[in-house]
Image: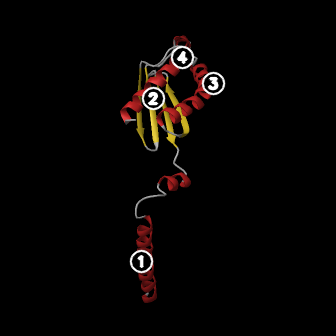
Amino acid sequence: MEKTSVQAEIASYTGKLFRDTFGKGPSSVYVSIEDPFITIYLRDFLAPMEQVLIKQNKFMKIEETRDLLMQELIPEIKATLRVTAGINVDNLYYDWSLKNRTGLLLGVIKEDSEEERNHSYADYSHKEEIHKEINKVSNDAEKNRSRLILFI
């Protein structure tokens, strides 16, 4: 899947998820993927109930409510990113600017384990010859290093 179509799919999913959960979704969602991060920016995101609480200066109530909802949403978002986009998120953080009616989700993309990296590159053409050449160059470099140490 092309990067822009993946970003569009994630943006659409996120907008719908927040609309279904909060009763009102953001007016727009922007997704940026640059390894090792994925950012999801929510613009114009403030539910009608939250607007009432802001008028009453109950900012902490909004933050507490959003924290409770995000505890439920984070595992779902991570699972959806993994299944639909192949993005395995290790940690997902969020922050809100109630004044600006915006939100930001920041995901840290999980690095492949060494086993996964080795498995994906385990077989390639001329593998044995390449490894022999790497070993030869490494040995030559080590010999030169040893000679240098003797002179010092």
Tell me whether circle 3 and circle 1 mark residues in contact (CB < 8 Å): no
Which numbered mark, 2 or 3, is in the foreground of this view?
2
Q: Earlier in the sequence, mark 4 or mark 1?
A: 4
Q: CA distance from mark 4 to mark 2?
A: 15 Å
Checking the image for residue 68, the label placed there is: 3
Relative to residue 43, is residue 89 depicted above or below?
Answer: below
Callout 4–callout 2 Cβ contact below 8 Å: no
> Which of the labelled discs sits on residue 141, or is there none?
1
Judge whether 146 appears above or below 32 on screen.
below
Residue bearing mark 4:
20
* Quadrant (top left/top right/bottom left/bottom right) for the C terminus: bottom left
Q: Name the secondary structure under disc 3.
A: helix
The residue carrying pointer 2 sits among few (fewer than 14), some (14 to 19) or many (20 or more) residues within 10 Å by Cα, namely many
Which disc number belongs to residue 10?
2
Between the residue at mark 2 and the residue at mark 1, the CA separation in whole angstroms equals 49 Å
Q: Earlier in the sequence, mark 2 or mark 3?
A: 2
Q: Earlier in the sequence, mark 4 or mark 2?
A: 2
Question: Of the residues shown, which amino acid type is indicated by label 3?
Answer: Leu
The residue sitting at 56% across, 54% down in the picture is 115
Disc 1 is placed on an element classified as helix
Distance between the alpha carbons at the discs numbered 2 and 3? 22 Å
Few, some or many residues within 10 Å of mark 3 (<14, 14–19, 20+): few
Q: Amino acid at mark 2?
A: Ile
Q: Amino acid at mark 4?
A: Asp
Image coordinates for residue 5, horizontal then vertical, percent: 38, 30
For marks 3 and 4 on the same chain, the one whose residue lies earlier in the sequence: 4
**Residue type beneath disc 1:** Ala
